[in-house]
Amino acid sequence: MAKEFVKDVTSMDEDFAQWYTDVVTKADLIDYSSVRGSMIIRPYGYALWDNIKNELDNRIKETGHENVYMPLFIPESLLQKEKDHVEGFAPEVAWVTHGGSEPLAERLVVRPTSEVLFCEHYSKIIHSHRDLPKLYNQWANVVRWEKTTRPFLRTLEFLWQEGHTAHATDKDAMEETIKMLNVYAELCETVLAIPVVKGQKTEKEKFAGAKATFTIESLMHDGKALQSGTSHHFGTGFAEAFGIQYTDKEGKLQYVHQTSWGFTTRIIGALIMVHGDDRGLVIPPNAAPKQVMIVPIAQHKEGVLDFAYELKKSLGSVARVDIDASDKKPGWKFNEYEMKGIPVRLEVGPKDIEKKQVVLVRRDTLEKVIVPLDELEMKLVELLDDIQSNLYNKALKHREERTTVALTLPELKESLEAKPGFIKAMWCGELACEEKIKEDAGATSRCIPFEQENLAENCVCCGKEAKQMVYWAKAY
C-alpha cells in the first residue's frame, strides 16, 4: 500500500528538485497560482507557518520588541535616498505606474523590504536619547521580481518578519544584531531541529546598504546550503541619508545606529529539504501543527469511534492531537499522514481496546510501539521529545558527514563534485579569489563562521596569506 501511494513521489536520490516539487504539492502545503512564481499557501502549509511565526513572535516580544505595520507602497523618491540600498534592489523591484486609469505623478514600489519606510518614520519620532532604543518588528509580505522561482525557496511574494531598530551607539546596535541572530539560531535548532552555522557574510554577499551582515546557514539533504536567516548592522549609513538624529546627554546632535533582521517562509523549504524522505514530509514535533493523528481501526465496530474521541480529548493536554474518522481505509490514512509528516500516528481498534493499549507509530523511523493506556500520556511526551532530538541529531550527523576541508582550489572543486556539502577553506579576503572560486567551482561563500579554525596559512585560491576560514557551498 505504501509503495502504491508514494509511487507518484519521485525518489530524492533520483531527482531531488522533482521530489521537492512533488512533496510541497502532495502534502497539501501549496498550490500554484495564475501568476508565475506565486504560490497559494494552503491551510496545512499556513498552519506550519503559523506555528513557526508564533514561536518567533514570542521570542521577539520577549527581547523587548514591539510589532508595527508599515505601508505596502514606497514612493520612488524615498527608495532613492540610500544609494547602495536602491542599487541592490533595483533588478527585483515591482513598480506601480497607474492608479485606476490615471498615470501616477510618482511611481510607487511594491515593498521589497521596508528599511526606507522605517527610516522615514524614525526621522519623525526620534529626537532625544530618551527615545532610544527603538525596537520595532513587522510581520508582512514583500515582493521581489525573481527570475527563477521555486515554492517557499524563491517566490515573487513571500511572508516574513523584518525587525528594524535604532540605537544610541554602535556597540548597542552590534549587540542587537548578534542577539537577534542568536534568536534565529535557537529557533532553528530547538523548534525546527535544523542545525545552523553562525557567521558573517563577506563584503560581496552582505545586504545592500549594510555595514555588516550576519547569517545562519543550514545544509540540505542534497548537500546544498540555504541561508536561513540574516541580521544586519547598518551603522549610521541610513541615519545620515534620512537625517535620523537625536540629542545626547550632553545636548549634542548624534546619528542613530540601526539594525535590521529577517526570517521568512523560505524556512519551510529548509524544513522540507533537511528532514523529508521518499515518503514525504517529516515534521519535528515542536514545529508540527498536528503532533498526533489518531486513526481508528475497524471504526464501524461498536465503541471504537467513541473510544478514539475520548483519547483525543484526554491527550489534548499533552500534545496537539487530531483524529481521522472519515470512511477512507486505514491504509490510505497511514500513507496520507506519513506524506504530511505528522510525528506520531496512533492506531486503536477493538483488540487494542480489549487489551487496554494503543499502537504508536513514529514518523521519523516508522517504528511501532505498543503502549498500555495507563502509560500513554507519559510515553507520548517521551516519544515526541525523542523524535525531536533524533531529527536534530540526524541532520547534524548529515551535515558533519558532508563537511570537508580543502587546501587548494582543485581540491575544493573536486570535493564539491564528489560529495556536495560545506567546504571549509582558508581565504585571503580578496574579492578576486571569492569570484574565482564561484567561477571555477560554482561555490559561493556562505559565511565567515564565528568559530574560526586555522586550517592552513595560505588562501585556498591564490596561495597568499590567509585571513579567515570560510564555509563555501553551492546554495539555493
Image (cartoon, rainbow, N blue to C red):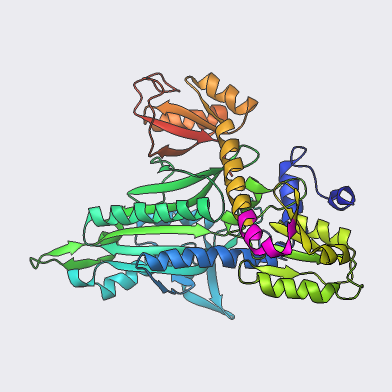
User: Magenta: predominant secondary structure element?
Assistant: helix
Instruction: Return the residue nearer the eye: 273 or 106.
Output: 273
Q: Is residue 381 in the magenta section?
A: yes
What residue sits 42% from the left and 30% below the top?
432
Instruction: Return the residue nearer the eye: 273 or 251.
Output: 273
Up/down of 25 relative to 415, above or below: below
Q: In this view, does 268 lie to the left or right of 165?
A: right
Residue 201 in picture, x, y percent from top left: 41, 43
Residue 55 in picture, x, y percent from top left: 51, 64
Picture quadrant of residue 433: top left
Q: Is residue 442 visible?
A: no
Up/down of 412 relative to 200, above or below: above
Range of the magenta residues? 371-383
Number of numbered discs on residues:
0
Up/down of 224 relative to 59, above or below: above
Q: In which quarter of the image is the C terminus?
A: top right
